[in-house]
Image (cartoon, grey):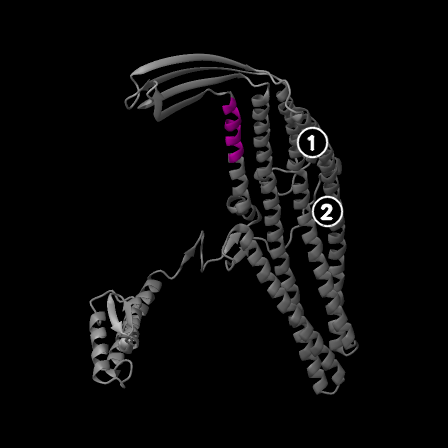
Amino acid sequence: MSSNTTEYGYGGFAMNKKISKQILVAIMLTSISAAAGAADTTEHLDATDIVKHAASAELSDSRKSDVSPELREKLSQQIHADMAKRAEKAAKKKEADPVIVVGRVPRNEAVQLTLPRTVGMALDYNRDIKMAHYDLKSAEYAINEARAGKMPNVNYSFAATRSSSQTGVAGVSTIGNRFTNGLSVSIPLYTGGKVEGMTEIAKLGKTTAQEEVLRVEQQTKLNAIKGYYALLAYKQLKDVYDTSVTNLEGHVRNVTAQYNVGTVAKLDVLTSDVSLANSKTDAVTAANNVANAEASLDNILGLPINTRLELADHSLPFNEYNMSLEDALDYAMKYRPEVLQAALAVEKADENIGVAQSGYRPTVAVGAGRNWFDTDFPGTKNKGWQLQGTVSLPIWDGGATRAKTKEAKEAFTKARENEQKIREAVQLEVKQAYLAIRSAAQRVQATQTVVNQATESFKIATVRYQAGVGINLDVLDAQLNLDKARTNNIQALYDYNVGIATLEKAMGMDVRTGAVIPTNA
């Protein structure tokens, strides 16, 4: 006999298809109520009661709604009450602790930054530096791994054997057990120089990892300085355009007043309005650049990107730089991590030649062992011992050692070429950074003169126009020239300060000295 009734299981209840929808809706509403966070003494509807209520409602009249209005209303009131209690608790918690701390900085507070503090925070929290330190730790463990090739090896073994054998003419089978324990010690006395070479390579790897830490720190410092000066420069540029808007607003008022009395043409009003609108657009762009620079510096420092930053400096500095190009090049060749890493790579390649040639040499090892055996577990009744000395002399390995040696020699030659390439690249980088500083210094001096002249020109043009002896175009051109002069001056100052930081990085200067600008000894 077939049946159209379908059974569903939910939370331990078996239900008929006809009433499943009503019950599931009721239980869902109850689950929502529980999720609202009601964990107090408020009376809640029991799921079993809801199921019974829905089932009885369906059985009494199959055409009724899924959930009775009374039940729906009661559930709705319960959910609203629970949500109200939850909101009240959240409000009390917020009132008790209005400042939510995220990471190292309270969300509602601005971070006060000086240039040294900016560099220090970047060095302390940068993830690339942390990863470089992990690589250094790995390199230290690699030394121990290489040294282990000269250490004694101690091994214990246990074997359990069950065997069957047939003896005699009649072929009688016997089954026996054998349990064996063994303890052995082996000591390599000579490995042909392989272990020594691998150990030296591992030591060079550790030194390379140390230089990598310094390289990452220097790059992080450069990024932090660039971020600090970029934010400072954009703040100054914003001030330039805000001042321009203020000046042009005053000029527009003056032009409008003169137009109202009939002393100037409508064209003056229109052109002045256009210039003001353009300046406002530039001011908006400048404000957006400040926000982007602030978020970028937050990221460099490992802060939430919405953290407000307040800089101790209000203008880009201009300090004399005294190091000569020759001193900078000499310093870079001695301390630049990439140069030292390239030299270490040559040493490692040389050691690899010795490791490859160890395949031509014999190996010597000694060993000792003790064993116990018996037919009963654990097999310690009978015992024995052994001493052994092993000398292995390679005669022919199919040319593998010869090929490895040639391969290592080619790698050595390549490493030397790479070292020279890196030295030349670093020298070029140092010289370019040095020349960029000189160029920026000259531009700073030139643009400062232009700023002074443009400021005076704007004042004169404004006074002449107000007196009725100048034209509107003179004022607008003077304001435009002033904005350009101040912008060029800020750009030159930024290039100068970032150029110094770039030269420091190119030289491989120690980031922990705290000196932003090195002095010529």
Residue at image position (68%, 41%) is 506
Write down the quadrant of residue 424 in the picture: top right
Res 411 label? 1
- Looking at the image, is 381 positioned above or below residue 489? above
**Number of marks in picture:** 2
Q: In this view, does 411 lie to the left or right of 131?
A: right
Question: How would you rate the neighbour count of disc 2 (Cα within 10 Å): few for under 14, some for 14-19, many for 20 or more?
Answer: many
In the rendered image, which residue does mark 2 sit on? 437
Residue type at mark 1 is Ala
Residue at image position (51%, 28%) is 145
Is residue 191 something that shows in the picture? Answer: yes
Task: Report the predominant secondary structure element of the magenta stretch.
Answer: helix
Which residues, given as a range, are shown in magenta? Answer: 138-149
Q: Earlier in the sequence, mark 1 or mark 2?
A: 1
Res 170 label? none
Write down the quadrant of residue 198 in the picture: top right
Residue type at mark 2 is Ile
Q: In this view, does 239 lie to the left or right of 12?
A: right
